[in-house]
Amino acid sequence: MRNFSARKTLGFVHLWAGLILCLPLVLLGLTGTILALQDNGGPTIAASGPPQPIAAMIAAAAHVAPEAQKPSMFVAPATPDKPAAIRFSAPGRNGPGFGAQFFVDPSTLAVTEATTNRFTRQVHMLHGNLLFGREGRDIVGWLGIVMLAMGVSGLVIWWPRPGRWRAAFGVDRKARGVRLHRELHGAVGIWGLLVLITVSFSGVYLAFPETVSSIFGVTDARSLPQPKVQPVEGAKPIDADRAVALAEGAVSGTLKSIGLPQRPDQPYRVALAHVGDSDGAPVATIYVDPWASRVIEIRDPAANGGVTAFIAWQRALHAGEGLGRLWQALVALSGLLPALFAATGVSMWLLKRRARQRMAAARVALPEAAE
C-alpha cells in the first residue's frame, strides 16, 4: 500500500509538472531539433588547388572587414569542400562572435560575407535563453533539471509488473483512448529515455557549468584564467601558421580553430582534434606565445580522462556532435519527444477528466430517474 501511494504521488507530480511546463519544454525540444540538424560548415566550394597559408586567408578577410574590427578566430574548413571561417571582434570586445564573419576559399582566397539567418538567430536565442538574456539561461537550466526529473519519474511510473515487460516496450494495435495514449507515452519514453537523459543533463551543464563541474569534483575549463604572455619591445610576433606548427609539434592532431590574440599580452589559442575523433569531439587546446615562439600550456581533457573527459564531452553530446550521424539523428529525434509527451499526456488527462465528468453526471441522474 505504501509503495502504491508513493507511486501515485509521483504520478501526480509528474502529471502536473508536465501540464504546467509543457509549452516551454516543447519549445526547447523543437528548437533543439532544428539546431541539431543545421549545417554550420558554410557554403560548398569547389576545391581548386592546395590551400594557401592561414595568414593569407586571415589577411584576405581583413581586407574586406570593417576597418575597426580585428580578426579574433580562424575556423578551419570542416571538409575539403568547405571554406575557412574568419570571425572578427568589434571594438571594445575581446572575443569572437561580436563582429563580422567571413568565409574564405582556402585555394583562391575568395571572400564571402557570412550572413546569419534571422530565423536561425531566433532559434539559437530561444533554445539558449528563451529570449530573456542571461537570466533566461538559468531558466533553461532549471527546465533541464525538470526534464531530468520527468525522465526519472517517468521510468518509475512506467516500470511494468511481472509478466508485462515485453508489452511495456510497445503499443497494442487494439489500444484505443486513454490506453493508446498511455502505451504510446510509455513506449516512446522508454526507448528514447537514454538519449533524453543525456541531452537534458548536458543542457543543465551548459547552463550551470561551474556548479555541475564542482559536483563532480573537477574545475570547469571555461572558468580557468587564460595564460598571459610578455610582449617583447621591438620584436615581431609569429604568425598563425607558425603557431599551428608549434602546436602540432606538441600535440598530434587536426587543426580545428585558432583563437587570435587581441592584445599584446594574449597567446594564440590553437585547438586540435585528436586523430580518429569525429567532428565535434572535445579538442586539445594549445597556448602558444607569439613573442617567444613556444608552447606555454596544453589543456587536453582526453589526456586527463575520467570525469574531466566526461564533462568535456557534454557540449558535443548536447549539440549532436562527436559520435557521428547516428548520434546527431538521435539527438534531433529526442527534441521531438517533449511534443509527443505533451500531446499524449494532455490527451490522457482530458480523456480521464471527461470520463470522470460523465460518471459524476450519471450518478446525479440515477436518483432523479428513480424518482
Image (cartoon, rainbow, N blue to C red):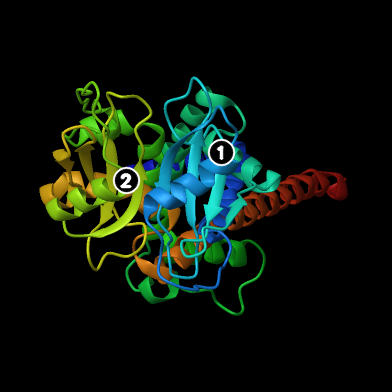
Q: Judge by depth and name the residue closer to the eye, 340 or 226.
A: 226
Label 2 amino acid?
Ala
Of the two numbered discs 2 and 1 on the same chain, state the one appearing first in sequence: 1
Camera sees residue 335: no
Q: Position of residue 219 (x, y in %)?
A: 20, 32
Q: Where does residue 20 sit, x and y in percent of width and height? A: 60, 36
Q: Secondary structure at mark 1?
A: helix
Q: Residue at x 59, y 65 (%)?
A: 179
Q: Which residue is mark 1?
A: 16
User: Relative to residue 202, is residue 264 depicted above or below?
Assistant: above
Q: Residues within 10 Å of mark 1 (few under 14, many from 20)?
A: some
Question: Image point 20% across, 24% down: which residue?
Answer: 232
Disc 2 marks which residue? 240
Of the pair 335 and 113, the residue shown nearer to us: 113
User: Horizontal and vertical percent for residue 313?
Assistant: 29, 50
Q: In terms of secondary structure, where does tag 2 sit? A: helix
Residue 40 sits above or below residue 173 on the image: above
C-alpha span from label 2 to label 1: 55 Å
Circle 2 crowding by C-alpha within 10 Å: few under 14, some 14–19, many from 20: many
- Residue 241 is left or right of residue 307, and the answer is right
Q: Is residue 364 visible?
A: yes
